[in-house]
Amino acid sequence: MTVADWDLATPAALIDAVALKRNIARMQERMIALGVRLRPHVKTPKCIEVARLQLAAGARGVTASTLKEAEQFFDAGVADILYAVCIPPSKLDRVLALRRRGCALTILVDSVAAAQAVADKGRADNHAFDVMIEIDTDGHRSGVKPDDPLLIDVGTLLHRGGAMLKGVMTHAGSSYDFDTPEALQHVAEQERAGCVRAAERLRAAGLPCPEVSVGSTPTALSATSLAGVTEVRAGVYVFFDLVMVNIGVCAAQDVALSVLTTVIGHQPDKGWAIVDAGWMAMSRDRGTQRQKTDYGYGAVCDAQGRLLDDLIMTGANQEHGIVSRRDDAPDPHIAERFPVGTRLRILPNHACATGAQFSEYRVVTTDGDPPIWRRFNGW
Amino acid sequence: MTVADWDLATPAALIDAVALKRNIARMQERMIALGVRLRPHVKTPKCIEVARLQLAAGARGVTASTLKEAEQFFDAGVADILYAVCIPPSKLDRVLALRRRGCALTILVDSVAAAQAVADKGRADNHAFDVMIEIDTDGHRSGVKPDDPLLIDVGTLLHRGGAMLKGVMTHAGSSYDFDTPEALQHVAEQERAGCVRAAERLRAAGLPCPEVSVGSTPTALSATSLAGVTEVRAGVYVFFDLVMVNIGVCAAQDVALSVLTTVIGHQPDKGWAIVDAGWMAMSRDRGTQRQKTDYGYGAVCDAQGRLLDDLIMTGANQEHGIVSRRDDAPDPHIAERFPVGTRLRILPNHACATGAQFSEYRVVTTDGDPPIWRRFNGW
């Protein structure tokens, strides 16, 4: 039985279970070789079954991007969770409720204001929150610079305020801007060194800092040494995507998430096949636009997942995708090649964004009807 | 009570009920003035309560972009539905099931292959489907050109095959590329004339063609005559968005959908406030990027919805948004102006895409806690 035979409503999100398990094993082996724990970021798949495979392979705890993820994963039996987005005061009640249910939920701050709110809330509710400080090692987003005096202020405020200062964490989001092993190794070392430097400064100030947490998929797969680091966080590696192909940390055949779609029409003069996966299915993410290969809204495979290298999804409306040649030379035989009803699979630019358009995954196994794995969205 | 006081988890999708009702009334009045029926496209809000307001104002039936929308709206009591995406054979069972439950569901084709499949299915199941033919009046996507001989072939095949040929429909998606009243009037007239021309050709060939359905929000609001047209479809007008502001068919204060967010940190040196609405909340849609005013990931308002004209969301990660000055001159007082915990509202580039990131809307009324309106997603 093949995907083409399945009586699946399209568009549908497919997980290639073989690629998924290979990706999980690869990252886990790399972390073992580097001597660090892996705390996978569940924000990409938001799926209990995927996390269970990661934990079974050796991961320790998970990283969440929303409190809803934390709640869902705790309900599914995962108690060790880092909520890796700085916490505003209005979310502390929900954090406290989860911790009082037994969840070892760690929260994040990068400012005196947030640290003060955490300390105040802990005092008011007689509770010691587990807290990490976000470090900015590449200037791309949030965090305290490793050498900023603010780091010690925030750490001191938390520690004296009764919180458990668990350590420091950073995310080298700028790693997405590079595509050579040398540049990625450089970003990985910058991420490691900056975070370790912050930990050393906290310790030198007499503050506890047991954990040093770094990560992004490109840096995790490029780092040659993680001296001083205790854990790595990475998310998208579990599915990979075309952005990661362009960065150079995987091949197209490693991409475990695809969107199954059906041809619904053609514009033969233009060499277009119109499919029923538009941006609502693929997401509006055009992450490969600024990279060395622009895949439009996705790379095109046949229903069995074999890459059709001459085609990409060149355009997308809400429920329409346009599949045509990437070299802009119209294929005059597009309608004969892919008649109405033909099924295709589209590999996504960005698995986190494409996954988010679906409430469930269909899992492609070697035979039989695919199981359904639920995905959750929202906050 | 103001939005700032609500104990809402952020990010949250807010509907400004005053703007919503004003937008609904404006479009309905325009359609009455032009002497056509309005069949609103529910793909933007995907919300029963919004559709009920549109129907109460005078709309007749709805337009759907997925079969799930058709099923959900039929279950909610709306029986007259046009599924405005060309139908592949694999979806006909689901269409038939819905029609046999009493839903007056009209489907769409633009090819001999699809028309043949509809005729075959009707014959096999002894059922006469209601079918429209999609017309391509601007070359932007699907449809048969008004003067293409294929039009008569498709119409004949449907009619002789036992289907009810309800008429022709077109969508001038290219209207989104213009931003002057003159250009929009021109596209509206091209849309009208092309669709009417197709209807006349079908009728001249002895085929039935009672309905002539056109529409997009920009053309619906720009058309000066709709002679020969029986109904107009439009969707995004109900919320409007920044793309529509740039096109010139509404003002920022007409945008009825916004994302409520909380400030979670700052990078004072860069003039950044970091908020908890990233692209997961706003969507990856950057529809204003190629327009006259680029709003980044959205325009920024205070919690009451008053536009803060100097700011936009300049960047977005999955759960982080960067709010900063649109003129790139860092505001050195950003942290004092918007302390951690401050609530802001972000107007979206594209309401269809931003709405799709949420499973419910919070409705901003003049007082009291806001009601929740459910939204559905998926297929």
Image (cartoon, coloured by chain):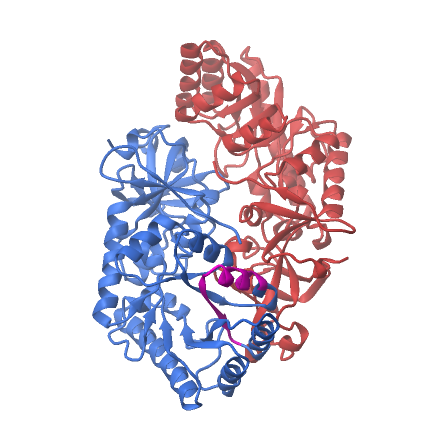
Chain colours: A red, B blue
Left of B113 or right of it: where is A149?
Answer: left
- Give, as a single range, the part of the protein colored magenta: B93-110
Above or below, B72 against A338 in this view is above
**Residue B237 in view:** yes
Rendered location of residue A52, percent (x, y): 69, 33
Query: Is B142 or A374 nearer to us in this picture?
Result: A374
Q: Is residue A12 magenta?
A: no
User: Which residue is at a point 51% across and 16% down the rendered structure image?
Assistant: A129
Q: In terms of depth relative to the viewer, which is nearer, A295 or B74?
A: B74
Return the x and y of residue A41 as percentages of the image width and height: 61, 35
Q: Is residue A348 above or below residue B146?
A: above
- Farthest residue in the front direction? B126
| Residue closest to the eye, A225 or B299 | B299
**Quick check: A367 left or right of A248?**
right
- The image quadrant that residue A312 belongs to is bottom right
Does B103 lie within the magenta span?
yes
* Position of the N terminus of chain B by quadrant: top left
Residue B346 appears at what percent x and percent y? 35, 43
Horizontal and vertical percent position of residue B311: 32, 44
